[in-house]
Image (cartoon, rainbow, N blue to C red):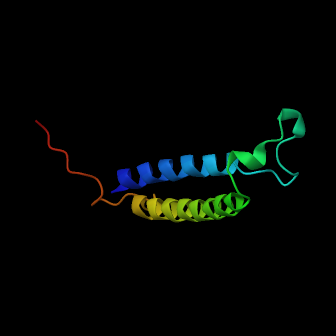
Amino acid sequence: MLSTLVVLIALVSALLLLAVLIQNPKGGGIDPTFGGQAQQLFGAARSTDFIEKATWVLAGALIVLCVAAALMVGTGGELTPTDIPLQTEQ
């Protein structure tokens, strides 16, 4: 189960990275020096709303998955005698 969570965390992290990278910066988007075609890249202006919402959803999912993985791993406290497997001598 923990390995499944790790794979999901990696997938959500990659999607979050892509969502952040394709957003327009608050400064107004791509500089006209580079062609100024940023608005035509994703179609209508509504696409920025979707990308922003997707970023928030992915960020929330990443937080939840990381907390779940941390709870599954445990506290990492001291070992008790029951945690140490018995070793037999041959």
Q: Is 47 left, or right, of 28 in this rendering?
A: left
Is any atom of residue 75 visible in this view?
A: no
In this orientation, does residue 87 appear?
A: yes
Q: Is residue 3 left or right of residue 62?
A: left
The answer to whether residue 53 is left or right of residue 32 is left
The count of marks equals: 0
Comparing 31 with 64, the one in front is 31
Q: Nearer the viewer, residue 89 or 16?
A: 16
- Identified at 53% across, 63% down, the residue is 61
- Residue 28 at what x, y percent from top left? 86, 51
Position of residue 64 relative to residue 10, above or below, is: below
**Residue occupying the point 23% across, 51% down:** 85
| Rendering coords of residue 35 (x, y %) | 83, 35
Q: Residue at x 51, y 59 (%)?
A: 66
Q: Position of residue 89 (x, y in %)?
A: 14, 39
Q: Is residue 42 above or below residue 70?
A: above
52 and 88: which is toward the camera: 52
- The answer to which of 41 and 3 lies nearer the viewer is 41
Q: Which quadrant of the structure image shows residue 48?
A: bottom right
